[in-house]
Amino acid sequence: MTYWQRLDRKLTARAKRIYKTCFQKQFPTGWSFIWYFLGATDHSCKQLLHVGGLRERSDMNVLCHELLHVRLPKMRHGKQFEKMVRKMVRVAEKVK
């Protein structure tokens, strides 16, 4: 296994722990993470694309933003959405 494969596994495991901590539910099956890509969520092929390695707060913000799209796909961007993302970031930063 390469360095990048090991890192991807670690990041994916942490992201799933963050999802479980924030929503008290297991991460949905069938979804996959693609790391080091522009942050986006694609519901048609169930891929969560993410930039960065969860080292900085901005990386965590993008991850929480995309996880919220996975959990609430019909919720639109706006004040309430951003408020939920900020709450998730505060919780997610404590998850190792």
Image (cartoon, rainbow, N blue to C red):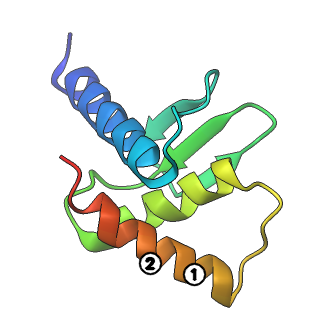
The percent coordinates of residue 48 (x first, y second) are 57, 42
Label 2: element kind: helix
The percent coordinates of residue 2 (x first, y second) are 19, 17
Q: Residue furthest top?
A: 1
The percent coordinates of residue 12 (x first, y second) are 36, 34
Q: Is residue 46 above or below residue 57?
A: above
Q: Name the quadrant of the N terminus.
A: top left
Question: Real-space Cα distance between discs 2 and 1?
Answer: 6 Å
Q: Would you identify the image quadrant in which residue 87 lies?
A: bottom left
Give me the residue at 53% from left, 58% from top.
39
Residue 2 seen in this snapshot: yes
> CB under 8 Å between callouts 2 and 1?
yes
**Quick check: 3 left or right of 66?**
left
Q: Is residue 58 above or below residue 64?
A: below
The number of callouts visible is: 2
Q: Residue furthest front?
A: 24
Give me the residue at 53% from left, 34% from top.
27
Residue 36 seen in this snapshot: no
Q: Which mark is residue 86?
A: 2
Give the residue type at disc 2.
Arg
**Quick check: 8 left or right of 30?**
left
